[in-house]
Image (cartoon, rainbow, N blue to C red):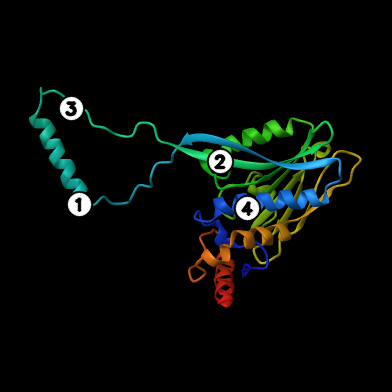
Amino acid sequence: MKSPFPGMDPYLEDPAFWPDFHHELIGSLRSGLNEVLPDNYEARINEQVTLVEAAPPRSKDTLPDLAVTRHGELLAAARSRVGAAVEPVSVPMFDEQEVREAWIEIRHRPERQLVTVVEVLSPWNKSASGLAEYLAKRRALVRQALHLVELDLLVGGERVVPRWRLPPADYYAFVARYEGRPNGDVYPWSVRQPLPEVPVPLQAPDPDAIVDLQAAFAEAFERGRYGRWIDYTQPPITGLADADRAWAVEQALLRG
């Protein structure tokens, strides 16, 4: 079952779908790259698992009456027991969550020299806690003699390139060639457009490999069967502009 959108499906930004789709898309991109890469190159998926401190739950504007009453009872009880032995209370002291990150490495054979890294950004990369970590990794990559391609298919979150430097768009592909830094190429597009073809630089003098993002997206979407699980009767969870959000809802309803 195909997506009802001409390009990126904004409903996939829902946390219920994005982690799984992220891995499906990386697999599709890797397969597409291996089809167009010269024989002396290979595209491989690498992965890293990191334990990070879990984000605290969102605080509410008001507290329920029961919680206020209970707090008063505990305070009164504590005051009545001045001088008594203090009883311990068991609370979670170490709260960690697992962050799994995957990316594509393009290597030149036979020595398997790393030539290009392709990143598909995740919400963690674009969050307040994860952005600093990703930017540190990014700086380490661009200090090496290799190319970096970053695909930002999420409307929400921070951008890895300052917004004031970017043309207005919903999605971006960033291509940073080793020989062109500190500048790089930006490919912007909107939710109403198909995903573009993006060049993936290789080792000179070899020409760029061209990856068809729309084809990779369609393959990942159908293989993951997301059209069966997404509830298109509800508005998408995304930071689209109001007009684009209304358009997305209309597209989703036309699907039915």
Asked if residue 240 shows in the view, the reply is no
Horizontal side of residue 141 vs 17, given as left or right: right
Looking at the picture, which amino acid does disc 3 mark? Glu
Looking at the picture, which amino acid does disc 4 mark? Glu
The percent position of residue 136, horizontal first and vertical second, equals 63, 33
Question: What residue would you read off at disc 2?
Answer: 100
Q: Label 1 vs label 3: CA separation? A: 26 Å
The percent position of residue 78, horizontal first and vertical second, equals 13, 32
Looking at the picture, which amino acid does disc 2 mark? Arg
For the N terminus, the quadrant is bottom right
Other-residue count near label 1 (Cα within 10 Å), few / some / many at <14 / 14–19 / ≥20: few
Question: What residue would you read off at disc 4?
Answer: 24
Horizontal side of residue 33 vs 126, given as left or right: right
Q: Label 2 vs label 4: CA separation? A: 14 Å
Q: Earlier in the sequence, mark 2 or mark 3?
A: 3
In the structure shown, which secondary structural element does the residue marked by tag 2 occupy? Answer: strand
Question: What residue would you read off at disc 1?
Answer: 65
